[in-house]
Image: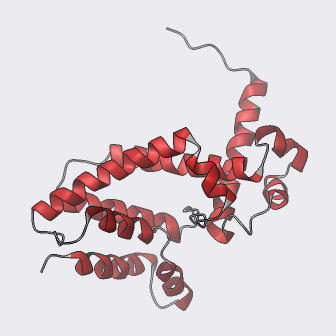
Amino acid sequence: MLQPKVSFKAQMLQAREDAIIQTASRLLAEKGFEAMTVDEVAASVGIAKASLYKHFPSKEDLAAAAMVQLMRRAQDYIGALPAQSAMAQLRTVARWTMELKLKGEMPNLPSQNSTLRAKLIADKAYMDGLIEVSDRLGAWIEAAQAQGQINPQLPAIAVLYTLYARACDPVLEFLKMGGQHEDAQIIDLVMCSCFEGLAAR
């Protein structure tokens, strides 16, 4: 069945919306939600703030759209992983999130009392994605514990949050600022400290 043809205007609006979300993602990674402003997003995209508000009625809506896009990206990445051991899957995902962080493509997580956090909790697309990703990682964590590769005394939820924290680990940026290591070496160092610390004894 043929898909209806998308008008040129609709294509342009979608391209502009994509550019807005991409810019917001970069600024969320660089500055975090509190420091990011709608003015600088609009200026970076090259549009008036009023035009941006036609796409996203608030700063929270804009940041939430960027976080939903990131969550979908994570779902797609995890869904496309080849079959391998549970521990290998966890290592692969952890490495990928750190690569995104070092490339400036991983938005910083909002603080507990942030208006963005409240918006995300109410966002079905984001929460559904978070649950799906958490369930996949949780199953791999439990399998790795059953195989004696992760300390079975650790609650699986604690291991999950430890892995999530690597995606926003300030150690990555501190090591990068030091200028003594390439990105791949930095990731290897953090992977070692994280996974060797989790290894069963």
From this view, report whether residue 165 is shown above or below residue 190.
above
Q: What residue is at 36 percent from the left and 52 percent from the top?
A: 134
In the image shown, does 157 or 90 lie closer to the viewer? 157
Q: What residue is at 16 percent from the left and 69 percent from the top?
A: 152
Q: What residue is at 16 percent from the left and 56 percent from the top?
A: 143
Residue most extreme to the front: 113
Residue most extreme to the top: 1
From this view, report whether residue 126 is shown above or below residue 111.
above
Q: Is residue 119 left or right of residue 140?
A: right
Count of marks, rendered view? 0
Q: What residue is at 18 percent from the left and 72 percent from the top?
A: 153
Colour scheme:
secondary structure
Q: Is residue 72 left or right of residue 140?
A: right
Q: Is residue 58 left or right of residue 33?
A: right
> Where's residue 86, x and y in %?
20, 57
> Where's residue 48, x and y in %?
90, 48
Q: Quadrant of the rendered structure where residue 184 is?
A: bottom left
> Where's residue 2, x and y in %?
54, 10
In the image shown, does 44 or 60 lie closer to the viewer? 60
Q: Is residue 29 left or right of residue 200?
A: right
> Where's residue 102, x and y in %?
51, 71
The quadrant of the rendering that contains the C terminus is: bottom left
Q: Quadrant of the rendered structure where residue 177 is?
A: bottom right
